[in-house]
Amino acid sequence: MAKPIQLSPKDMINAYLLFFVVHGAQIGVGIQGFQRIIYQDARQDAWISVLLAGIATHLVTFCMIKTLEIYGSDDLYGIQIDIFGKWIGNFLNAIYVIYCSVAFFSVLRNYIEVIQAWIFPSIETWFLSATLLIIIIYAFTGGLRVIVGVSFFSIILSLWIFPMLVFPMEYATVDSLLPILENDIRSILKGAQSMTFTIIGFEILNVIYPFVKDKKKIRKPVHLGLLVTTIIYLAVMLVSIAYYSEGKLLKTIWATLTLFSFISFPFMERFEFVAVCFWMLIILPNLCLYLWAAYRGAIRLFPISEKTFVWLFSFIVLIGTLLVQTRTQINTINTVFGQIAFYVIFVYPILLWPIARLKKNFASKKVKKNE
Amino acid sequence: MILLSFVFLYGCAQTNILDKVGLTTLVGYDVGTEDKIKTTAVIREVNPEFQSNVEVLSTENDTSKGNRMEANRKLSKKIMVGQMRVILFGEELAKKDLRYYIDTNLENASVSNGIFMAIVEGETETLLKYEYQNIEDIGQHIFRLIEQNVKQEYMISSTLHQIAHDYYSSGKEFAMPIIKRDDELVELSGIALFKGSKMVSTLPAKDSFYVKIVRDTFKVGLYETVLENEDVPSEILQKPANKITVAFDAIQSKREMMLVDADTPTFDLNIKIKSRVLEVYPDINQGDPKSVAALEKAIEKKLSKEIRRVIAHSQEVESDIFGFGEKYRSEVRHSKLTKDKWQKIYKDMKVNVHVDFTILRDGVFE
Amino acid sequence: MKFKLPFNKQQQQPVQEAPKENLVRVAHATDHFIQSIKNATNNPADLIVKYLPPNVTLIYIDNLIDDQTLNNDIIANLQSKPHDTPEAIEMALSIAEVSQSSLLRETVELMVNGHVVIHIGGFPQTILANIASRESRALSAPENESQVIGTQVGFNESLSTNISLIRRYIVSPNLCNEKVKIGTRTSTSVSLLYMRGIANDQMVQTMRQRIKDLYIDELIDSAVLAEMIDDNSLSVFPQMLLTERPDRFCDGILDGKIGVLVDGSSMAIVSPQGFTEFFQSQEDQNLRWQIATFLRLLRLAAFFLSVYLTPFYVAALTFHYEVIPQAFLVPLSESRALVPFPPIFEALLLEFIIELLREAGARLPTKIGQTIGIVGGIVIGTAAVQAGITSNILLIIIALSALASFTSPSYMMGNVIRLIRFPIIILAGFWGFYGIMLAFCFILIHLLRQSSLGAPYMSPFYPPRLKEMRDSIIRMPVPLTSKRPALTRPKDEHKFVPEPVKPDKS
């Protein structure tokens, strides 16, 4: 077996914090406008797609944890090298690092697009991207403890947004949800697949696993985190379907933000303007965790210091955000990335588990024979 | 430091300082000459004399944004639409097509989804440009007028969200209030019925109660009706009269729409109203349970008659403002309902109206 | 990006060979001895040399000793009968702290500390009697941390008085007191206090090490010491509490914290300290829990209000006019109409004026300070609005946030609140809500990165310890808070055995 990662207890995190890590990594830019993408396929049964996607995350996570448990205290990068050997393993690791980087990039670029579309049409992309990157670098250099802390506070401090869903209920009609299961199962499944881009994030588990103190206790917080995410997506989806009519939902790009548009308080109107800016706190754990995951993989591939890596990475991302200019390009990236992510996140771990088991059995037999 | 100042200089966002912008509170659209859009905007400006003055500007251009630019050229302040509260359409324009206006306002992120839309009898320009004696800010006034009436449930609500919702729904048409100038005042005069994005008919303001009661459930709504002699059993009258005027406010209403036959289609419309009688003229004996029951019956009868009339009218013009189509879509599997399809079906739809009217209490003096 | 300050590290002390003067012995002959003392102390004007025939010499510094004790307990005893040997004299003195020394340097050091040097001609030793008396003011009520209910006594500048105050609160042999001298020139006494059996050994060791590693030549106040031994001295947020209340100090020590007292300073250092604890007042413990909870929530709200209200105003007026409710729109824009500046400049100007008033009020004598505060506030406020350089709504907002910033029980944290407002206003003025959020995220991450004596600064929120939130932003009834905070990693976790709130009346 490859050398397990040596960690000092100070870098370790408690198992229950995984709830915040998983949940924080899942909720991000996707929730702002995932409704219409699912709705295109599954119509008023889109909520079933969300539910199915939620169940799928539980299954995949189950496999992931099983795979990780075989190796005890190693992350996906180590497991891949062990199973596939140095060359293929490193190749797969490189793919995973690139995957994390693209995820990071996609979250960042989508958020910038939202800011530009809603609030500051005139503000430059490079500026938004640079300011966000500086914040992320600051969090990243604080180490895993700070990153997990950011996830924690991001969730705690955004709890108040969830009850805001009550406001649109005033205009909601339950009839919009009916008839249930009118669409065939294929389109519902297709809708569930479209959820990929929105629901991913829990794969961070693959990388963070060695850093957890009591590894036996991780199931509960992880699955709870997935469950809460599913519930939130489901609630948002149900409210959206009931609030919008079919044609309007298809035409609304950021349906969740538009939901907030007529919420007003005696001291403030147009709640979505605050929400859009506040979303920065919600995407922060996304970005930090992906960056961190990419870093964990990168140090396996080539020796690089944390500082060099983060500055190099940020620089490349900054250039990247400048190259992607239009909404069409962003949407293309989202779609392509969503499809790739589907295979990386939902298909691959399920395949990896039996392979890891076989390998393990094979290895233990070999040891016995040698004895 | 240099880097920082560089960032501050180049990264600065475009400002919209409150007192440097002219806030459009109301926009009216009319048909202009040669297919152009004629826009009348009510713009509130603040000047250093601690007074805000209201400008009413009319411009004509090909697009609404072009109109904004033209208006900008006439004012000292940048015109912004983020505080817009009402959009008005001229009657003529509404009869042509409103689709463009709905879409363009949905697209604009700074336009709230909660703004009201209404139709003006005649031209918006003449309504807005009239020098009202007691109305200082016509934009504000019309907003308050509509808002107040919607809150009191006297008038159907027509926010941009609701309009867009109904417009993009396959089984519902939208409706808007109609306003007109009445001498020195502005009044809500009726409801405009739409088919697609074209206005096809109107209903008088009095009928808004029936429209509301079928469209949605509500809490407080004052209503007055005249019961014809033939509807009222004579025994409850203390002295003979030709008609009875009843005023009540519906404390709670609940409507239930049921599809009983998908082929024709036929709907059952059950409406339950719990109300408080405010006024009955001439007087009847309200202490007597029998006469109260009779009065309830009479009102039920009257209400169902009126509701049937309103629905029939909307069927005639193929404008399903009540959302029967949505019900149809949600009940009939694989209906593949489209707007056109429903408009045809709606014409021949049958509705059985049942009203259940309960008088909970009257005032404090019998 | 962890910043370390040079004095936090162990500086390579120049390895000195013990200079010869350290080993110089006390001379036998009286004349020699006196001369050597005079040389060593640069012959100050207050050096008194007194001969007691036949061969005894008393040397002391006039301003450091207690004259009465000198007369009654030393001179009287020495005069009553002659003594020949140092031992005999040591026996004869009715003073508690008497020692002998044969080294000149030691003698001089103790003399400077308030000992009387007794030298007997012919003996190479001196007898040192401690009769030091330090001028210090009487105990008075703590002025900066006053509270309505609770003890009305504060630390003063004398280390021994302060320790006696603490000993009065904690009558226990487990109260450890370690003395360290800091400063090569001032040689200030620093006391490290903690409870054995509660305080975490590792933390005590860290604290001791940090203090001992300091290589500085002067230490005047404990605030300086606190800055030097902070985990991150460059952060604007204080990581150790400075308090002048002995009750707060003792409460901290009993929770397993470590206290540091500096001679000559009326402020004591308590560490480790979490961020939220800066918003708690000792008074909270003395009030009913509902009221204390309300006050704590009030202070927390005041913190957010103070930091974010003005930026919110600036952002809304500069960029996001859409969020202003219609009812506010007219008053806001009308009050802004005369103001020639953009909102950011207007806000910064007013904040600046308020800070000026505060600073002037703090520097001037109390009576004038109050007058200046009121006059300045009213005159400048009214005049500014009438002259049209600010809007009156902003005036209210600024005054409110200034007021809110003073609710923080810790003066240090209050300063932080006032300071961090400025960058946030600037960010809000340039990038609206986006700028505010940037600042918010930055502060959040910054706070998460800090630690206090190695313990997480954001505790008990992060790492989340649900049970301890009982006594953080809310204060649960005392019977429910039987555990010590885990922030200090105490050895003994329980303050008392939790019992039912109301034992059944028999």
Image: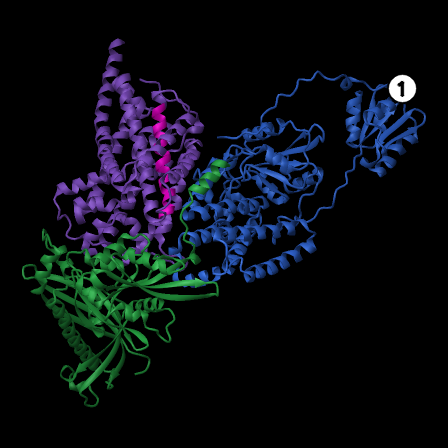
The colour of chain A is purple
Q: Quadrant of the C terminus of chain A?
A: top left
- Is B134 in front, or is A182? B134
Return the residue at label 1: C29
In the visual, does C390 lie left or right of B260?
right
**Residue A102: x %, y % from top left:** 30, 32
The subunit carrying tag 1 is C
The colour of chain B is green
The chain whose colour is blue is: C
Give the residue furthest to the top. Answer: A370
Residue A278 in the magenta stretch? The answer is yes
Residue C313 in the magenta stretch? The answer is no
Give, as a three-letter code, the residue at label 1. Answer: Ala
In the visual, does C393 lie left or right of B348?
right
In the visual, does A34 lie left or right of B333?
right
- In the rendered image, the vertical position of residue C291 relative to residue A70, given as above or below: below
**First to last magenta residue range:** A276-298
- In the rendered image, the vertical position of residue B352 relative to residue A68, given as above or below: below
Q: Is residue A38 visible?
A: yes
**Residue C209: x %, y % from top left:** 59, 27
The answer to which image quadrant residue A333 occupies is: top left
Mark 1 residue crowding within 10 angstroms, few (<14) / some (14–19) / many (20+): some
